[in-house]
Image (spheres, rainbow, N blue to C red):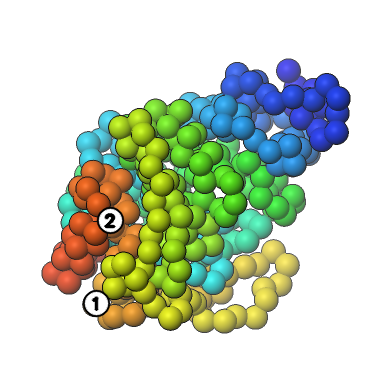
Amino acid sequence: MALTDLIKLVAPGRRNGRNLTFQECRRAMAAVLAGEESEISAAAFFVAMRFKGPTVEELRGFADAARAAATMPCEGMAGLVCVCPPHDGTSQAPPLEVAAGLVAAGAGVRVLILSDRCVPPRRGLTAANVLEALGASMTWDPAEAESWVAKARFAACSVTGMLPGLMGLRRVREQVGMRTPLSTVEKLIAPASAAVVAGAQGGPVLGMAVEVLQGLGHPRAIALQGMEGGVIPSVRRHTRGIELCDAHLVPIHVEPEDFGLQSQGEPELPLYSPAPSGKGPCDNPSLVKAAGEMTALVLAGEPGPARNATLFGAALILKAAGRAMTLAEGVDAATSALDSGRAREVLEELRGLTG
């Protein structure tokens, strides 16, 4: 069934409208990724899906097709946690998933950040920007990412490197200018054998995100409504999440004051002037430098909101990996890895591999 036919089924207000089946969504996404549908049809379809509201089965169908078309790194690797923040990055909150991932790797977990760079419409800062500012890099080669994780316990891989068919959909995102189910599906392209820590936007999508991860076969996962929809909790107020563990879904409430990590304000990047059309935070060298410097200061032991947020992020990765039974244990292990210098050692090893 062509996208134009599916649009008629999901368009709001139609009497004969209905949700799509898993197979219909799987075939639709496969056709889009193979270039069998125009970008205009793809844009209309994903916008229609946004206004209808996707179901768990629809998202699972989209993600299953994307995974089947992708070259997946680290499939079957023991002890792996995939960190899946929003691909369009952040504009105010620094992308501290790099610092959190390095700390978790220093505590013994294998960490693979699945991200990208300069993704529209936000074109925010991502792990790629931070790693470049730190003298390391993200890779576009899945085999290289797997090698780095095996050697250094840490890597960041471009999802468009894993799935080149997403490049055309980047243009769709830019033209549509709003979040659609595509933004969710991108964060679900990860090896099914891995544990996952994924960012989720505010609202009722949190439960849906973790149910989709469960349906895709992940043994463990945490979906979190972190800062700007990312994987890093707030250090000023509580953050909601849901954990998947042993087929059970358990709510998570990250309360900074319970761990002595509460701050008066969130870690923030410097203010910047609104970017011209087609530009964003990732195109601002001073912001990229500031994000890298903030991560370097955290790894050097500087106290403050960024350190506290990093410890929470690392604790969640450790919990998803099964290395910490509670968030408190995760914070303790993350603090030890950071203060002992093991996180900096992971970065130095990564620099040697990427340089």
Above or below 23: residue 130: below
Discs 2, 1 touching: Cβ within 8 Å: no
Front residue of 182/156: it is 182
Q: Of callouts 2 and 1, which one flags the residue occurring earlier in the amino acid sequence?
A: 1
Mark 2 or mark 1, whichever is nearer to me: 2
**Which residue is drawn at the image coordinates 17% and 52% (left, top)?**
108
How many angstroms separate mark 2 from mark 1 (CA)? 23 Å
Residue 300 — which label? 1
Front residue of 55/4: it is 55
Residue 355 pos. (x, y %) = 29, 61
Residue 269 pos. (x, y %) = 49, 77
Residue 327 — which label? 2
**Which residue is drawn at the image coordinates 34% and 71% (left, top)?**
257
- Residue type pointed to by label 2: Leu
Q: Is residue 190 visible?
A: yes
Is disc 1 placed on a helix, strand or loop? loop
Is disc 2 placed on a helix, strand or loop? helix
- Residue type pointed to by label 1: Ala
* Quarter residue 316 falls in: bottom left
